[in-house]
Image: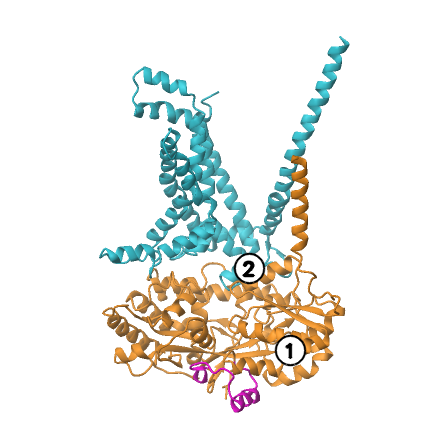
Chain colours: A orange, B cyan
Amino acid sequence: MKKLCVVLLALLMVFSLVACDKGGTPGKKDPEKVTEVFLFSSIGAYKALLEREIPKFNEGEGKEKGVRLVMETNIDNYGTALQAMIEGGNYPDMADMYARPNFLAAGYAQDLGKIPELKDLVERFKPYLAQGINYQGEALYSLPLEILPLKMVYNNVIFEKCGLTEPPKTWDEMADMAKIITDKGKSEAKPFYGFGWTTMWTASFTRLLMEATVGSTGISYFNNNTGTYDFTPWEKGVKAIARMYQEGSMFPTPLDQHIDPIRNRFAEGLVGMEIAPAYDVSVYTTQFIADFDWRVADVPALTDAGKQYNSASLNRGNVSLTKWVAKEDMPAAIEAFKFMHSKELYKTIYSNSGMIPHEPELIAEVKKAGFESMAVNWDVMSDTAGYTLINVHPTSLLTLTGDGVHDVFTNIMLGETTWEKEIEGLNKRYNDAYAAAKKDGLIDVAIYEAGYDPGKLK
Amino acid sequence: MRTKRKFAKINLKLRKQEIFQSYAMIGLSVAGLALFVVYPLLWALRWCLYNYSGIGEPRYIGFANFANAFSEGGQRYWQSVGNTFVFAFGKLLIELPLALFLAYILSDKLKGRSFFRTIFYLPGMLSMAVIGIVFFYIFGSYNGVVNSILNAIGLKSILWFSEGGTAMFVMMLASIWQNFGLNMLFFMTGLQSIPADIYDSAAIDGASATRRFFSITLPMLAPVAQMIILNALLGSLKTAELVLAMTNGAPNGKTEFMMSYIYKQFFSSTMLGTSNNYGFASALVLITSIIMGIVTVIYLYVTKKGSELYE
C-alpha cells in the first residue's frame, strides 16, 4: 500500500510538472505556423494600453503575418531581471536596452542600421536620432520612443486655502511656500503638508531634482563638452529640500514613503506640491485618482538667476532587437518590431495621454482627430515648447567607490552632513570613477564627449 | 564453527550494505551542498581578484578590491559590520532569555501548552522579507498602527525610521518576533533531555525552584545552548532581507548590515544606478566569511567548558 502511494505521488508530480509547460517556447513555430516574439518591457506608465493593443495586433495584422507578440513587464528591477534572464538562458527577442550602455557594449542588441527591412523605419525617425540614446557610436540600437517632460504638480485647493496664487518660481520659494502650506495644514482635521518627496526611490534626487532642473543649468550633472561630473549647480535645490525636511514641510517621512505612496498622498489631497514626470498624469487619473483641482507648472528655477529653458525632458528610446533572435524567426521579430514603432501605436498611446512622440505630425494628427482619452491636465503636461532634451551620461558604466549622489544628498537632507563638507569629495569620486572607466575602455568618448548642443524643443 | 563463520559473513554483508546506504543518503546532501553552496561560493570568490560588472569581460586587478575594502572605499562596509554586531547582540540579549523562559514554562504540564507552542512558532514560518514589510507598515510614520495608537492616547507620532536608534529597534523587534519561537522549541528539546531524577534529588535536598533552575537547568542545558546560541548568532549576522524590505540601510547607513551592503554591491545597477561591482562584492564576501569564522572560533573557545559537561 505504501509503495503504491509513493508511485502515485511520483506520477502526480511528473504530470503536474508537465502540465506547467506553457506549451512551447517563444520563437518556436506552433502547429498554426505562428512565431512567438518575446518582448521584455520596462514600461509601466502605459502598460495597460500596450496590453490592450498587443492582442489586437496578434488577432489582426500579426495573425496574417504569422506573428504573435508576447509581452512581459518588470518595472521595478528591470536591469537586474533582464540580466538574470540572460544569464539564465531565457533570452528575450526585444528588450529595453537604450538606457543600459553596458548591455549594448556587451553586444546584446542588434545594429538596426544593418537590417535592410528596417531601412524605411529608420529613415522615418532620422531627424530625431540622438547619440548615446539611439546610437552608440556608429551602431544604431534603438529608435525614438518619447519625449518625457519633467514638471511639477500642485494642489490648487490647498494653494487657495493658504492664500497662494501662483506656483513657486525658485526652489527657495518652493521651500517658503511648503512651510506656509504645512503650517496651515496643521490646523486641518487631516493635516496636509507642503511638499512630497521620497528617498526610498534611489533615483529621486537624480530624476526629480537634477534632471528636472536642467532647464536652469542648461546641462545635466555630466557635461559632454568637458567630460566631467559637476554637482555644484544643484546646491540651492539640495539645500531647499534639506530645509523642507528639517522644517517638517515634507510629508512624513521621505524615508518611509516610496514614490507610489507619496503620489497617493498627493492624490488624497495631503500634499501641496510634487515634482512629476509626464507619466504622472496617468497616475493621477487612473491609478491614484486626484479628484480635486490639481494643476501642472514648470519646475522652478534653481536660483534667482532664472532658467535657460522652460524646463527639461528626457529623451527615451524604444525597444531593441536582441542578438538572440534566431535567423528563422527574424522576419517575425521584424514585424513585431515594426508594430512597436508603428505610427498607429504611437498615436494611440499619445491619444490616450500615455506618451509624447517626437514626430510633430503625429501630435498634429491626434489633436486634429481628437484625443481618444484626454486625461486631466494632459494638454499642459504634454506641452514641451521651450524645453530642452537632457543629455546622456555614462553613470551606469561607472564603478563608484564610496557614497553616491543619492546617499550624499539624503544625508544632507537629514542634517547628518553639510553640502560644503561633501561636494568636493562627491565630484572627485564620480570623476575618478569616470577616469577609471575611460582607462578600462568602457567609455566611448565619441558618445560621451562629443559635445552637447541641447537646442530647444519647439 | 561453520555456522559462526556463516553468521560473520552475513553480518559483514549487512554491515557493508548499511555503510553503503548511509553514504548514499549522505551523498545526496553532499552533492546538493557542493552544487548549490560550494560551487556558487567558489564562482563568486574568483571574482574578488577582478573588476567585473557581470556584463562584458572581467579585468584582472589583483588585490585592489581588498585594498579598497580596507581604505576609504570600505568605510560604509565597516560601518555595516558594526551595525550588524549591534543588531545581533542587541536582539539576542532579549530573544534568547525570552525563548528560554517560555521553553521552561511550557515544559511543564500546562493546560494549552500545545496551543502556545504553535502560536509562538508560527512567525518562524514566515519569510523575513514579509515580516520586514509588515513591520514597516506597522511602524510607518503615516497611518502606521503604532503611531495611530499613540495618537489615539494623545501622544505624538514617532518617526521610527528617521533615526538610526528607533529604526534599529524596530528591526530588532521584527527579528525577535520571527525567531524566538524556533529558539524556544530548541530549548524545550534541550530541557527534555535533562534527567528528571536530578530535579527529584534536588527537591528532596530542599533546593528551591530558582536554585534548581540556576544550579541544574542552566548547567545541564549548556551543551545544547551552546549550539542554539551559535546558530542564532550566525543567523543574525547574516541578516539582509530585513534591511532591504524595511529601511534599505537608511538613515545614513545606520541600519545597513554586512549582507545587505554586499548585496547592493552585487546589484549596484539597480540599487545605486552605477555599474554592478561583482569584484568588490566578492572580496567583501570573503572578508565577511573570515569575520564570521573568527566569531565562531572565539565563541566556541569561550563556551568550551559548557560543551564538555557530559564528557
Residue A276 image position (x, y, % from top left): 42, 75
Q: Position of residue B276 (x, y in %)?
A: 55, 59
Q: Is residue B226 left or right of residue A339?
A: left
Q: Which amino acid does label 1 sit on?
A: Phe
Q: Which amino acid does label 2 sit on?
A: Asn
Above or below, A155 relative to B25: below
Residue located farthest toward the bottom when viewing the structure as drawn: A368
Q: Residues within 10 Å of mark 2 (few under 14, many from 20)?
A: many
Which chain is mark 1 on? A
Magenta span contains residue A357: yes
Q: Which residue is drawn at 39% across and 25% down?
A: B219
Nearest the camera: A299 or A42? A42
Question: Is B208 placed left or right of A326 in the picture?
Answer: left
Q: Quadrant of residue B8?
A: top right
Q: Helix, strand, or loop for circle 1? A: helix
Q: Is residue A453 visible?
A: no
Residue depicted at x 43% and y 21%: B195
Contact, mark 1 vs mark 2 (Cβ under 8 Å): no
Query: Distance of mark 1 from mark 2, alpha carbons?
Result: 33 Å
Residue A339 — which label? 1
Q: Is residue B118 above or below residue B310?
A: below
The image quadrant of residue A267 is bottom left
